[in-house]
Image: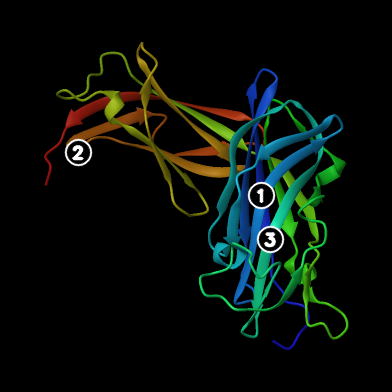
Amino acid sequence: MKPSRISAAAALALLLAACGGQTGKVSVLLKDAPANFAAAVVTISEIDLVGASGSTVLSTTKTTTDLLTLANDTAKLVNDVDVPVGTYSQLRFVISGGYVQADGVIYASSPTYDGLPAGAVVGGTLRMPSFAQSGLKIDLPGGAVTVGTDAKVLLVDFDVSQSFGQEAGSSGAWVMHPVATATEFELSGTVDVTLKLGPGVALPGATTLADFKAVLTPSAGGDGTSLALLSDGVATYAVSFKYLFPGSYTLTFTAPSGVSFATAPPLPATITVTSGQATAAAFIVTSAASVAVQ
């Protein structure tokens, strides 16, 4: 590889979803984009959320991942961890090891780094000053994020083009000095869907509304999410679609084979998800009948 810097981009999505009371829930997802490395592997051994009153540990599970494999995928590093409600200014990653492979040569933080593939021959050093102790610190947008009753989405840009480079001089070593900044902040939303039978309407046979599913699909395209309806113990069946990015969605219901039905409002319905808000989507079955299955 000719350049001493390698262009790539990585992203972290920090999902902060409050659960009520004095705690909120935190999830962290790691994403990357293509680069000119053959491999760019890091081991994250601890993740903390840092506030004025100290640090809250989100995870001490050691995770080793090749950033390049995340170009079209995500790795969930933290899943629904309770944290105290409050204001936080930084996300901190303790990075205990790593390696890059460039021009067929592996540069590793240690010849015995346990993230190396079997039989790997280390040809050079990847220096990672202090990240195993003080950690990589990422400032949150606006200087602070408050974990409270709203669901929050924090997008952090991990600029690999400024984070890996060859050391000056003739050592041939590579140096990792991550540059990461919070680039975007918005609230996610929820759609609360309910479905019930209208007056005098009966479903055919032994069918119940528990056999129906609600399907929510982004209007701009993409895969839909299908969730089964659950009874409230009376006459209404409901389901909630959580942690949705703001925007327009199409909602419909699917019934068991051999059942046709109509609702008010009619389907498909357009649902608008608003930042930080829960949107109610209530439907009534106005008619239902058996149909021949072909």
Residue 36 visible: no
Q: Type of residue at label 1?
A: Ser
Residue 121 image offset from top left, x and y in percent: 59, 78
Quick check: 191 above or below 116? above
Looking at the figure, which quarter contains the N terminus?
A: bottom right
**Residue located at (64% from left, 74% from top):** 35
216 vs 53, left or right, is: left
Quick check: 276 above or below 2? above
Quadrant of residue 36 in the image? bottom right
In the current view of this chain or complex, which residue is farthest to the front?
112
Mark before the other along the chain sequence, 1 or 3: 1
Q: Type of residue at label 2?
A: Ser
User: Between residues 137 and 196, which one lies in front from this camera angle?
Assistant: 137
Quadrant of residue 18 in the image? top right
Mark before the other along the chain sequence, 3 or 2: 3
247 vs 183, left or right, is: left
> Where is mark 3, residue-wise?
97
Tag 1 and tag 2, C-beta contact below 8 Å: no
Tell me the SS state at disc 2: loop
Quick check: 214 above or below 121? above
> Where is mark 2, residue-wise?
257
Sort mark 2 into few (<14), some (14-19) or many (20+) by Cα contacts within 10 Å.
few
> Where is mark 1, residue-wise?
45
Q: How is the image coloured?
A: rainbow
Tell me the SS state at disc 3: strand
Residue 219 image offset from top left, x and y in percent: 50, 49
Task: State which mark lies toward you, 1 or 2.
Answer: 1
